[in-house]
Image (cartoon, grey):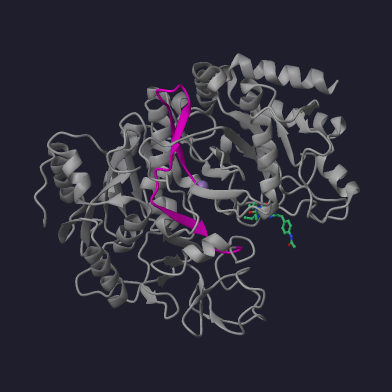
C-alpha cells in the first residue's frame, strides 16, 4: 500500500477486502492530475483507451457489448425485512446474499491492482456532503471517479482516525490469469453481474459490470439509493433532480429543481439558454439534488456531483450548446463512434453524418449501415467546472434556496405544457403519479406508459410508499416556505404526430410563468388537474406557433384524464397500507373534480 491510512474502519475494511479479493497490489488514490495521467497511461498501454486527436486530454472507451447500461433487474436492496424495500425494488435476504456474493468476490481481483478511492459527494467539508470510499479493480473507474466526485487526500484528512464513510465495493469480476493479456473491457457475464445495496448498513456491493451507474458507485448507488434512505432517517431529501438558477432581466434569482425520468432531457434543461430576452440560466447540477432545511426555514440544495455523466446521442450545438462546449477537453467518452480524423461522433451530433466512422463495437460504419454508429446509451464524463454556464454558487457549501419544484414526463397526449399544483399535497400527488412514455433509450417496448414516481423508481433506497409520506412530512416542516410545485410536458403531439411545443430555449417561457406565479404577478385558471396559465400570461412573442396549436397544447380534456384513473389506482394499490391517506384523499379529490 502506497499511503499510510489513519482511519481504523477504513484500514480494517481494506484488509478484509484484500483478503477476500486477493489483488496483486493495493493502491490508495490521492486525486492528483499525475495520478489521473498514470491511470490513463495504463489504459492507453493496454489498448482500452483511444486518444482523440481533436480533443486535448480526451479518450474514447468501448465497452463489452453485454455491459452498456444500468442493470435494474440485477439491482437488489438487501434490507432485513422485504417490506422495507417495497414493491418497486428487487429484494434479497442480506444473510443469504452475503454468502453468494462473497463466493463471487473470492479471488476476483487476482492479477489486478485494487484501487482505494476516498471521495466526497458534495464540496469537501460541506455540512450537506457525505464521504464514501470506493474499492475497485478498474482504472477506468478511477479516472471517471476523478471527474464525477471529489477524490483525494483531503478526504482522508477529513476522515482522520475515526470519521465515518460509506464503503462501496466494486469489481469488474474478471480475474486476470498470470501472463494472460487483458481484454479491452473486462467484465463478468450477465448472470454474474449484481448490484447490492444494504441501506440499513450504509454499504454498497457491485460485481461484474464496469459501466456507469453500476461501477461509479458515488452516483446512483450512494448519492441516490443510499442517500435517499439516510435522508429519510435524518429528515432531508436526496432527489433525482437537476438544479438551475434562472435570473430575470432585473437580476432577481430563482432556483429551480426538476425531476424527470430518463430520456426527457434533464441535462439539456440544466444548461438551457433562454430565448426570452434579458433572462439568464445557470447550471448547478444535471442529475442529483441533496436538500436540507436551512436556518432560514427554506430548502437548500447542493449538487453532490463534480461532473456530468451524460447521454451523448442527441447532444448537439442546437439541442445543448453549453454541453458541447463543456466537452472540448478533458473528457472520457464511452461507446461513441470514432471519426477518421480522430474525433468522436454520435447520432444527432451534426446535421450531416460523417461518411465513415468506426462504430462503438470497433467495426467500420457508414451512413448506409443498418446499425447505429454510437450506442444509444453512449456517454460523456466531463468536469462540471468546464460548463460555460456553471453557476458561481455551484460549490457553495450552503447550497441554493429552492423556489420551484418541477415534475414531468414524456407524454404524446393528454398532459398540457405546464400546470401548477393547488397545494403541497397536490404537488406530492403529481410527483407520486408522474409517468413517461418509454423511448428507445429505455428497455422494453417503445411508447408504453411507465409510472416513475418522483423519477425515483429505480433509485429509491427504501419503500416508495414511505417516500410519499416523507414528502408530506417535509412539506409540513417547510410550511409556507415550501417550494411551489409544477408539472410540465415538453412532448405533447398534434393529431398528425408533430411535437406541438418547440421546447429547448423556449422552455424559458414556461419557467418565467412559474416565476411570475411565485411572485404573485399573475393569476391562474383553475382546471381539474391544476392551475393553468391564463391566456397571454405565457410570453410567446417570437414563438412560431398558431393559436390553434397553442390551444391544443394547453387543452385539458376531462375525458382523457378520466382514462388515467384506473392506471393511477393500480399504481397506488401496489403500496398497500404504506400508501399515505393524504394521497388517497388527493386521488379522491381529483376524481371528483373531473366529475
Ligand atoms: O431535452 C429536450 N427538451 C428540454 C430542453 C431544454 N428534448 C430532447 C429530449 C431527448 C433527451 C426535447 N425534445 C424537448 C425539450 O424541451 N422537446 C423535444 C421535442 C422536440 C424535438 C424537436 C423539435 C421540437 C420539439 N424541433 C425540431 O426538430 C425543429
Ligand atoms: Mn439520472
Query: Is-magenta flag for residue 356?
Result: no
Question: Where the N terminus falls, by quadrant?
Answer: bottom left
Residue 99 in view, yes or no? yes
Q: Could you tell whether 1 is left or right of 170 in the image?
A: left
Residue 93 lies in what quarter of the image?
A: top left
Nearer to the camera, 327 or 459 = 327
Check the image and report above or below for 76 versus 374.
above
Query: Is-magenta flag for residue 312?
Result: yes
Residue 172 in view, yes or no? no
Q: Range of the magenta residues? A: 286-314
Question: Residue 97 at what x, y percent from top left?
Answer: 34, 38
Q: Residue furthest front?
A: 250
Question: Residue 442 at what x, y percent from top left?
Answer: 60, 52
Q: Could you tell whether 66 is left or right of 18 in the image?
A: right
Q: Could you tell whether 144 is left or right of 20 in the image?
A: right
Check the image and report above or below for 58 versus 340.
above
Amino acid at each position: 500500500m502506497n499511503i499510510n491510512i489513519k482511519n481504523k474502519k477504513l484500514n480494517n475494511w481494506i484488509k478484509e477486502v484484500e483478503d477476500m479479493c486477493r489483488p496483486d497490489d493495493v493502491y490508495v488514490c490521492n486525486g492528483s492530475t499525475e495520478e489521473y495521467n498514470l491511470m490513463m497511461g495504463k489504459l492507453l498501454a493496454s489498448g482500452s483507451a483511444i486518444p482523440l486527436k481533436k480533443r486535448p486530454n480526451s479518450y474514447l472507451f468501448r465497452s463489452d457489448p453485454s455491459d452498456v447500461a444500468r442493470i435494474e433487474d440485477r439491482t437488489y436492496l438487501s434490507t432485513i425485512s422485504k417490506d422495507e424495500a417495497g414493491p418497486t425494488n428487487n429484494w434479497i435476504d442480506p444473510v443469504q446474499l452475503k454468502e453468494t456474493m462473497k463466493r463471487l468476490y473470492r479471488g476476483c481481483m487476482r492479477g489486478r491492482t485494487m484501487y482505494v478511492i476516498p471521495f466526497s459527494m458534495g464540496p469537501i467539508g460541506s455540512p450537506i456532503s457525505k464521504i464514501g470510499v470506493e474499492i475497485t479493480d478498474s482504472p477506468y473507474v478511477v479516472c471517471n471517479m476523478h471527474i464525477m466526485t471529489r477524490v483525494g487526500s483531503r478526504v482522508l484528512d477529513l476522515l482522520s482516525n475515526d470519521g465515518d464513510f460509506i464503503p462501496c465495493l466494486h469489481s469488474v469480476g474478471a480475474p486476470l490469469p498470470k501472463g494472460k493479456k487483458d481484454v479491452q473491457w473486462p467484465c463478468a457475464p450477465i448472470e454474474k453481474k449484481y448490484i447490492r445495496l444494504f441501506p440499513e448498513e450504509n454499504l454498497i456491493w457491485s460485481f461484474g459490470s464496469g459501466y456507469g451507474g453500476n461501477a461509479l458507485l458515488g452516483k446512483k448507488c450512494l448519492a441516490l439509493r443510499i442517500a435517499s434512505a439516510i435522508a429519510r432517517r435524518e429528515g432531508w431529501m436526496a432527489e433525482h433532480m437537476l438544479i438551475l438558477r434562472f435570473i430575470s432581466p432585473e437580476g432577481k434569482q430563482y432556483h429551480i429543481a426538476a425531476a424527470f425520468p430518463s430520456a426527457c432531457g434533464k441535462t439539456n434543461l440544466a444548461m438551457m439558454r433562454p430565448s426570452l430576452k434579458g433572462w439568464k440560466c445557470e447550471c448547478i447540477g444535471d442529475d442529483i439534488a441533496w436538500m436540507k432545511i436551512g436556518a432560514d426555514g427554506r430548502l437548500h440544495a447542493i449538487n453532490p456531483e463534480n461532473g456530468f455523466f451524460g447521454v451523448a446521442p442527441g447532444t448537439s450545438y442546437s439541442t445543448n450548446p453549453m454541453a458541447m462546449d463543456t466537452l472540448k477537453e478533458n473528457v472520457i467518452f464511452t461507446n461513441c463512434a470514432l471519426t477518421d480524423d480522430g474525433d468522436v461522433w454520435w447520432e444527432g451530433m451534426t446535421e450531416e453524418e460523417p461518411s465513415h466512422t468506426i462504430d462503438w463495437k470497433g467495426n467500420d460504419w457508414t451512413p448506409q449501415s443498418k446499425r447505429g454508429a454510437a450506442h444509444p446509451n453512449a456517454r460523456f464524463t466531463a468536469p462540471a467546472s468546464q460548463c460555460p454556464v456553471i453557476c458561481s454558487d455551484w460549490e457553495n457549501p450552503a447550497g441554493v434556496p429552492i423556489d420551484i419544484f418541477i415534475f414531468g414526463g414524456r407524454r404524446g397526449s393528454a398532459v398540457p405544457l405546464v400546470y401548477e399544483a393547488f397545494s403541497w399535497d397536490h404537488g406530492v400527488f403529481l410527483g407520486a403519479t408522474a409517468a413517461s412514455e418509454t423511448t428507445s433509450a429505455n428497455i422494453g417496448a417503445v411508447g408504453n406508459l411507465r409510472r416513475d414516481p418522483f423519477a425515483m423508481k429505480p433509485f429509491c433506497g427504501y419503500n416508495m410508499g414511505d417516500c410519499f409520506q416523507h414528502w408530506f412530512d417535509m412539506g409540513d416542516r417547510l410550511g409556507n416556505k415550501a417550494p411551489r410545485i409544477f408539472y410540465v410536458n415538453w412532448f405533447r403531439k398534434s393529431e398528425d404526430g408533430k411535437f406541438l411545443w418547440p421546447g429547448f430555449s423556449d422552455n424559458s417561457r414556461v419557467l418565467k410563468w412559474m416565476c411570475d406565479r411565485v411572485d404573485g404577478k399573475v393569476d391562474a385558471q383553475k382546471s381539474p388537474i391544476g392551475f393553468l396559465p391564463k391566456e397571454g400570461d405565457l410570453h410567446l412573442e417570437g414563438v412560431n406557433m398558431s393559436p390553434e396549436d397553442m390551444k391544443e397544447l394547453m387543452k385539458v380534456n376531462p375525458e382523457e384524464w378520466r382514462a388515467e384513473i384506473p392506471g393511477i389506482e393500480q399504481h397506488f394499490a401496489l403500496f398497500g397500507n404504506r400508501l399515505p391517506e393524504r394521497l388517497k384523499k388527493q386521488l379522491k379529490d381529483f376524481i371528483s373534480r373531473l366529475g
